Image (tube, rainbow, N blue to C red):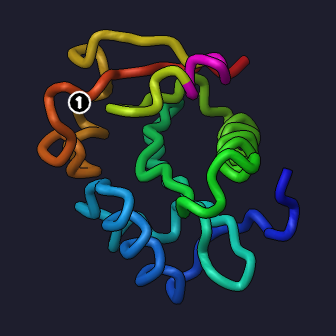
Amino acid sequence: MFTDYLVRRAKASDLAQIKELLIVSDLPTVGVEKAGEHFLVADNGQVIGILGVLCEGKKALLRSFAVRSPYRSKGIGGSLVTAMLQALKSQNIQEVYLLTETATDYFKQIGFFCIDRIVMPENMLKESGLDQACPCSSKGMKYVLD
């Protein structure tokens, strides 16, 4: 377990590193400029992990989850997800959604379950740009906060 990092809210000065991490992770950068302040980052002097969110009413859409390859499988992603879910719960968010092509099993271990993409909050997908940026093969997932 790697512990030499801090999970914190992203700052405007993190945007270039967030975009670079998305690019090297083959993830879409669409809408990141306007969503930048809605990211959590794992920071050890550089941004080594990211997780973004878009909230609307009692629902949230997770986006742009990535950890730099040398730091994967060290608990950083789990720390980001845990911190984000705690923050969303404190904001009275009840449902959390995401799209993924590669992390279905990872999110199932946390408690997310697969849903048909058609029941995803379409307005949030459009606002984030992920409706166009994520391929049709992406799996929809949902988590219910209690």
Compared with residue 20, is residue 76 higher up or lower down, i.e. above or below?
above
Find disc 1 in the rendering and name its residue.
Answer: 122
Please tell me whether mark 1 sits on a helix, a strand or a loop.
Answer: helix
Image coordinates of residue 1 in percent, x first then y, are 85, 50
- Residue at (28%, 51%) from the top-left corner? 128
Horizontally, residue 97 falls left or right of residue 106, namely left
Range drawn in magenta: 106-111
> Quadrant where the C terminus lies?
top right
Image coordinates of residue 6 in percent, x first then y, are 80, 68
Horizontally, residue 104 falls left or right of residue 1, namely left
- The foreground one among 17 and 11 is 17
Compared with residue 92, is residue 38 higher up or lower down, i.e. above or below?
below
Residue 29 visible: yes
Q: Residue 107: say if magenta.
A: yes
- Single out the residue that lies furthest toward the bottom: 13
- Residue at (42%, 52%) from the top-left corner? 64
Q: Report the magenta stretch's main SS.
A: helix
- The foreground one among 36 and 80 is 80
Compared with residue 92, is residue 113 higher up or lower down, i.e. above or below?
above
